[in-house]
Image (tube, rainbow, N blue to C red):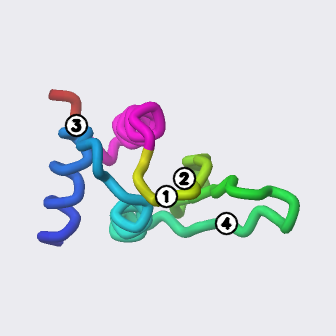
Amino acid sequence: MRSTVRFLSRLKSRPKDFTWKELCSLLGYLGFIEIKTGKTSGSLRKFADSKKNLIILHQPHPGNVMKQYALKYVIDRLTELGYLQDE
């Protein structure tokens, strides 16, 4: 639980060095699982929670640092789904 709180507070601060691995860990802690999208999907990744709510992103490449627009999307989506509180 402590890791979840730490990752959530780090995500909310929108750091320039938030990695794909950190995001996958955070979504896993929140109960999201990665859905396989097929072999022609390239870097597209879909994550679903138990209520089938989706978060759809492209995995960053060639590096693993998340883009700022993707972090904003994840924050907005988690807030919309009730996983984050507005401040």
Q: Residue furthest right?
A: 40
Rendered location of residue 57, percent (x, y): 58, 47
Q: Which mark is residue 60?
A: 2
Q: Which mark is residue 85?
A: 3
Which callout, 4 or 1, points at the residue further toward the start of the chain?
Answer: 4
Classify mark 1: residues with Cα within 10 Å, few (<14), some (14-19) or many (20+): few
Q: CA distance from mark 4 to mark 3?
A: 26 Å
Q: Which mark is residue 35?
A: 4
Q: Which residues are magenta?
A: 67-84
Indicate the quadrant where residue 3 lies: bottom left
| Mark 3 residue element | loop
Quadrant in which the C terminus is drawn = top left
Classify mark 2: residues with Cα within 10 Å, few (<14), some (14-19) or many (20+): some
Name the kind of residue labelled 3 in the image. Gln
Q: Which mark is residue 13?
A: none
Q: CA distance from mark 3 to mark 2?
A: 26 Å
Q: Is residue 81 visible?
A: no
Q: Are marks 4 and 2 in contact (CB under 8 Å)?
A: no
Q: Residue furthest top?
A: 87
Q: Residue at x 32, y 47 (%)?
A: 83
| Mark 4 residue element | strand
| Closer to viewer: mark 3 or mark 1 | 1
